Amino acid sequence: MKKRIGVLLSGRGSNFEALAESVAAGRIPNAEIAVVISNREGAPGIQRAESRGIRTSVIPSKGLEREVYDRQVAAVLDEHQVDLICLAGYMRLLSPFFVAQFPNRILNIHPSLLPSFPGLESQRQALEYGVKFAGCTVHFVDENLDAGPIILQATVPVLDEDTEATLSGKILKEEHRIYSQAVKIVLEGKYKIEGRRVLSAA
Ligand code: GRF
């Protein structure tokens, strides 16, 4: 049986696309993207999914209380019998209800070396802080923002001539690479969690 991935996004969807490419190319073996859900109408990521023939669902979140909204999303994920949830530019904090519903089955990609620069505009935060290395993190999701045990990270050097745009571009390339790697590790169960540490396991 193929493992079923559900992707939640709010925008562009390049990380979704990278995951879809990896699934199609067999870099994430025995898996399929069962559904892509957006909380925003008109998210380009939804069009990308449609053009790949992947099922989509737009569930507008505006004005809804967090848990009320999350229950709707959880119902769609259950309907599609999803094994793993990948947040890919999903601009919402998850309710404790949602996190408890899918323990250690939700991943997120964040464009910084966490725990540095959580939240929005991480690449700008890194540049303004003056760090010499930036990067990205794939982590399990808990109810706190950009927290949860770290599965993989990748670094990129920050050069004098970097701007927010060039730095973001370099980081994004690494995001696309390590997100697929992390999904493979998790789907194959080749890890164990000890405290906050995610260690490899055969
Ligand atoms: C990425 O930088 C990701 O790390 C962050 O939001 C951005 C989403 O980009 N969480 P995309 O929609 O995957 O292109």
Image (cartoon, rainbow, N blue to C red):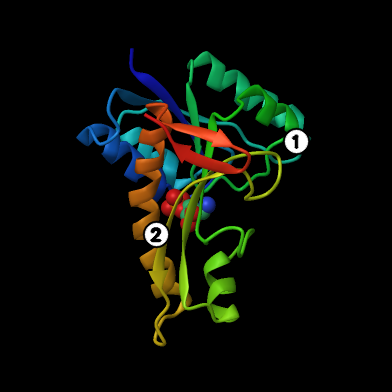
In the rendered image, is residue 41 in sight?
Answer: no
Amino acid tagged 1: Arg
Residue 31 spot, x, y in % from top left: 33, 25
Decide: few, some or many residues near mark 1? Use Cα within 10 Å; few <14, some 14-19, many ≥20. some
Residue 153 spot, x, y in % from top left: 45, 54
Residue at 57% over, 65% down: 122
- Report the number of discs: 2
Amino acid tagged 2: Leu
Residue 189's place in the image compared with 179, above or below, is above
Tell which circle, 1 or 2, labels the residue nearer the N-terminal end: 1
Residue at 55% over, 81% down: 130
For label 2, the residue is 172
Measure the alpha-carbon separation of dots 1 and 2.
29 Å
Give left or right: position of 11 versus 15: right
Q: Secondary structure at mark 2?
A: helix
Residue lying furthest left: 25
Decide: few, some or many residues near mark 2? Use Cα within 10 Å; few <14, some 14-19, many ≥20. some
Residue 84 spot, x, y in % from top left: 48, 27
Tag in front: 1 or 2: 2
Front-lying residue, 201 or 111:
201
Residue 107's place in the image compared with 31, above or below, is below
Instruction: Judge: label 2 CB < 8 Å from ligand 1.
Output: yes
Q: Which mark is residue 66?
A: 1
Q: Which mark is residue 140?
A: none
Residue at 47% over, 40% down: 199
Q: Secondary structure at mark 1?
A: helix
Residue 100 spot, x, y in % from top left: 69, 26
Residue 26's place in the image compared with 181, above or below, is above
Residue at 41% over, 22% down: 4
